[in-house]
């Protein structure tokens, strides 16, 4: 999510600079409209549009797993030395930031809906038709403005023939050009991306470009340019209009007057500017959407026990269900390889042999805990601290435990231990104890099918964090 926010801000900022330096002063208004809205939408989509530059991840070595004749320790008592205790924070920084974001987004959405209902209320009033426009007279001292084919105007303004003629022609352009659709989409995007400063600059640029388009078409329709310019200047004291509408009057009067009287550049110059803008934006889009295919995080998931080795109560079935649910989440980023997909017994040597053949980035062995103390609960992770993978294994253990604390108790522990599987695999390895079956609360969580899927999703999210940090 952080990467997405970063890419959208950077890409939108670069695209806006392209517009600012190459297109803003050009009288290519229709192209500018296309560029502004097109680049806005593409910059929102680019970070989630991955175009692969290289081949997919090479296939993982598959080997058949046949039970070995040689038996090495059927079960191990999972005890270790605690090296870290992890508490679930009541309010994390991410929780606070998300709450703040959602709170502000709701406020913007409320404002949008309020304004929309206000306009709908205005459209219910009596109106007169002028061509495609439905003219609604108001008593408010606001600028003339349009919403689709509705024109809202102060009744007294209609007494000025020059003003009303120019204004009606101007708003007719907004109506025919469907500028209201742009405004509504902009407002909806702002509700979601209110934190992006370039969204506000884009809104200003798009609305200003609407006015440039309307001014040009109005003058081309036969309205005297000098009289029209004077009307724009005289109307500058009215700075407010109905929200979500396209307004005849726009606060940047100077820019409108300059653009209205500015001569068009030569065809060659306009073509060069447009071509340059498109090339630069294409480069921005490629940088934010073309991504090297990172090697997937290969994880071997060992559903502990199986067959005649049931573990603690129905532990073998619980961890198998979670392992299967986790396997369904396997994708190009997290490659899940399950060690067993059915109720079968595998010796520790068989398990290690299979794991080492996969060239994995992580081995995750799933268990359910038990204790003579029925009050004992929570999540525990074990790792081996005397090999080259000790630091990675410890870090991965912390991540896996923290993510499980949302469902289980507020406390988790990371312990070091010398279990056979941890000592003999050739990759970072974690044994994850998912709660205590001897504890009524933990057991109720573990035996529930929906909770098992939730646990799998939480493990997947942990693996995604591991992949990012790796």
Image (cartoon, helix red, strand yellow):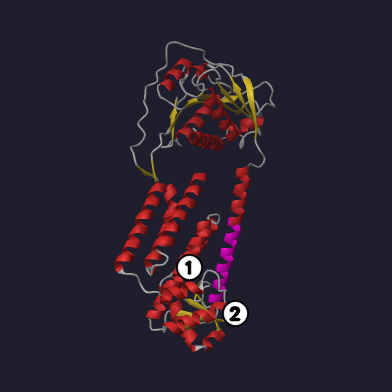
- Numbered disc 2: secondary structure: loop
* Rendered image quadrant of residue 372: top right
Q: Residues within 10 Å of mark 1 (few under 14, many from 20)?
A: some
Q: Nearer the viewer, mark 1 or mark 2?
A: 1
Kindly identify which numbered label has been placed on residue 45: none
The residue labelled by disc 2 is 141
The residue labelled by disc 1 is 207
Measure how far apart labels 1 and 2 are at the Cα level: 21 Å
Nearest the eye: 285 or 397:
285
Looking at the image, is 290 positioned above or below residue 12? Answer: above
The location of residue 194, given as percent across then percent down, is: 55, 57
The location of residue 387, given as percent across then percent down, is: 51, 18
The magenta-colored residue range is: 105-123
Looking at the image, is 453 positioned above or below residue 170? Answer: above
Q: Residues within 10 Å of mark 2 (few under 14, many from 20)?
A: some
Residue 218 visible in this rendered orientation of the protein: yes
Drawn side of residue 70 relative to residue 242, left or right: left
Nearest the eye: 251 or 103:
251
């Amino acid at each position: 999510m952080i990467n997405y926010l970063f890419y959208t801000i950077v890409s939108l900022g670069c695209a806006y600079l392209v517009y600012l330096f190459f297109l803003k002063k050009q009288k290519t208004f229709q192209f500018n409209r296309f560029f502004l809205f097109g680049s806005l939408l593409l910059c929102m989509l680019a970070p989630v549009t991955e175009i692969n530059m290289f081949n997919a991840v090479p296939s993982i070595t598959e080997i058949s797993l046949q039970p070995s004749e040689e038996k090495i320790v059927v079960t191990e008592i999972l005890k270790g030395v605690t090296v870290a205790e992890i508490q679930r924070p009541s309010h994390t920084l991410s929780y606070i930031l998300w709450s703040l974001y959602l709170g502000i987004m709701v406020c913007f959405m409320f404002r949008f809906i309020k304004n929309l209902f206000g306009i709908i209320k205005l459209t219910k009033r009596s109106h007169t038709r002028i061509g495609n426009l439905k003219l609604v007279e108001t008593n408010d001292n606001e600028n003339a403005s349009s919403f689709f084919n509705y024109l809202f105007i102060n009744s007294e303004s209609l007494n000025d023939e020059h003003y009303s003629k120019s204004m009606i022609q101007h708003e007719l352009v907004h109506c025919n050009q469907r500028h209201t659709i742009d405004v509504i989409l902009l407002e909806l995007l702002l509700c979601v991306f209110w934190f992006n400063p370039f969204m506000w600059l884009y809104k200003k640029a798009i609305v200003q470009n609407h006015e440039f388009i309307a001014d040009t078409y109005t003058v081309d329709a036969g309205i005297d340019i000098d009289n029209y310019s004077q009307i724009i200047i005289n109307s500058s004291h009215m700075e407010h209009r109905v929200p979500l509408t396209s307004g005849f009057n726009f606060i940047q009067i100077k820019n409108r007057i300059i653009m209205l009287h500015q001569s068009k550049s030569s065809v060659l110059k306009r073509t060069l500017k447009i071509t340059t803008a498109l090339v630069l934006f294409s480069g921005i889009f490629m940088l934010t959407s073309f991504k090297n295919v990172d090697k997937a995080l290969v994880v071997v998931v060992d559903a502990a026990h199986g067959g005649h080795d049931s573990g603690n109560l129905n532990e073998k079935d619980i961890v198998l269900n979670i392992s299967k649910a986790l396997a369904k989440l396997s994708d190009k980023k997290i490659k899940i390889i399950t060690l067993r997909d059915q109720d079968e017994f595998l010796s520790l040597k068989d398990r290690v042999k299979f794991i080492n053949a996969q060239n994995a980035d992580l081995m995750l062995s799933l268990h359910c805990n038990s204790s003579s103390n029925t009050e004992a609960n929570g999540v525990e992770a074990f790792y081996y601290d005397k090999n080259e993978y000790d630091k990675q294994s410890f870090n991965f253990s912390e991540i896996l435990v923290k993510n499980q604390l949302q469902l289980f108790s507020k406390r988790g522990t990371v312990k070091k231990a010398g279990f056979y599987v941890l000592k003999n695999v050739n990759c970072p390895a974690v044994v994850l104890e998912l709660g205590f079956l001897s504890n009524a609360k933990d057991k109720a969580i573990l035996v529930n099918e929906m909770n098992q899927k939730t646990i799998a999703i939480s493990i997947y999210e942990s693996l995604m964090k591991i992949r990012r940090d790796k």
